[in-house]
Image (tube, grey):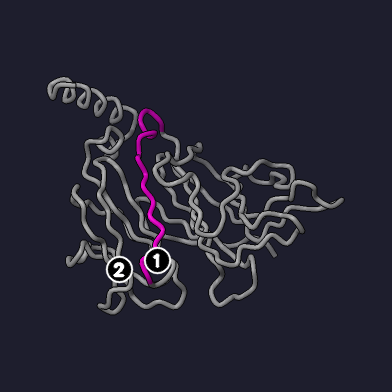
Amino acid sequence: MNNSLKLLMASAAVALVAACGGGDDAADVIDTGSPEIRYVNVEEGTGTTELYDNISLIPNTSGGYQYGSPYAEIKDDSHDYVIKEGGVETSRYTLDPDRGSKYTLVRLGNGDSNIIPIRDPYNNAAGTSQARIRVVNAAALTDNPLPGGADVYDVYILPPNTDVQTATPFIPNVPFRGVEPASSSESKLITAGTYELTIGTPLPASPPPGAQKFTPYSADITIPGDGDWLIVIVQDQGSLIPNMVHALIVPDNGAAFTPADKLP
């Protein structure tokens, strides 16, 4: 496709997205914006950690446990991204980003293998005010208490007072270190509104009579229009008991937060 036609199509797409409320994300939707990166730290017991573009500190990426940074624009060629704690390198990840895409580095602990990278192509926001949801399971003690049940979490986002036992998960089967929808896939869309967020383990294929889904965490949430949420399932601080978990929500335009568990 020649450059003039590309420019014409891009201009038309920007106008459409802006008219539909796309705002600053318009360039991302059509893959013309600068790539962006953010950093999430879910290693318990860490001090202040920071994300560097090789040797240069990326602004607003300094934080301790359960910290999630805002997105920052990055170069569109291959670079090493380095995580440091107390000025000492703990992890390194090489990224050759695509224009218009957004990237997240989730740190589980020291070492290069303890980074979960996520690429969000950010294409499905065009013409919609729905929110975007992705889930990461960072809880090492994920354990299904039912014999034969998979050691994964199902994530439910349901209208208030919906019976989770008969409901279908919004995002199912997320194992430890798993990302759903997978990296490089589109996030899952949901209409803005007030919901109950529940984390549970699925029933096995042949559940015993009277078996119930185990749901260790539930919280009230309000999802904004055009919101972009990364939901990180995290082991409760200091707990060595399986399934003692909560949700860390990392929005695209604000500080990370943990909704209060409403279960007794």
Residue 3 point in image, percent of width and height: 13, 24
Residue 234 point in image, percent of width and height: 52, 64
Residue 15 point in image, percent of width and height: 24, 26
Residue 246 point in image, percent of width and height: 56, 63
Q: Nearer the viewer, residue 23 or 232?
A: 232
Residue 171: which quarter of the image?
Answer: top right
Q: Residue at x 52, y 58 (%)?
A: 137
- Report whether 226 appears left or right of 233: left
Question: Secondary structure under badge 2?
Answer: strand
User: What's the amino acid at mark 1?
Assistant: Asn
Give the Cα distance between marks 2 and 1: 10 Å
Tag 2 residue: 83
- The quarter of the image holding the C terminus is bottom right
Looking at the image, is mark 2 or mark 1 earlier in the sequence?
1
Q: Is residue 196 above or below residue 106?
A: above
Tag 1 residue: 41
Q: Is residue 136 above or below residue 32?
A: below
Q: Nearer the viewer, residue 238 or 52?
A: 52
User: What's the amino acid at mark 2?
Assistant: Ile
Q: Is residue 158 above or below residue 174?
A: above
Residue 146: which quarter of the image?
Answer: bottom right
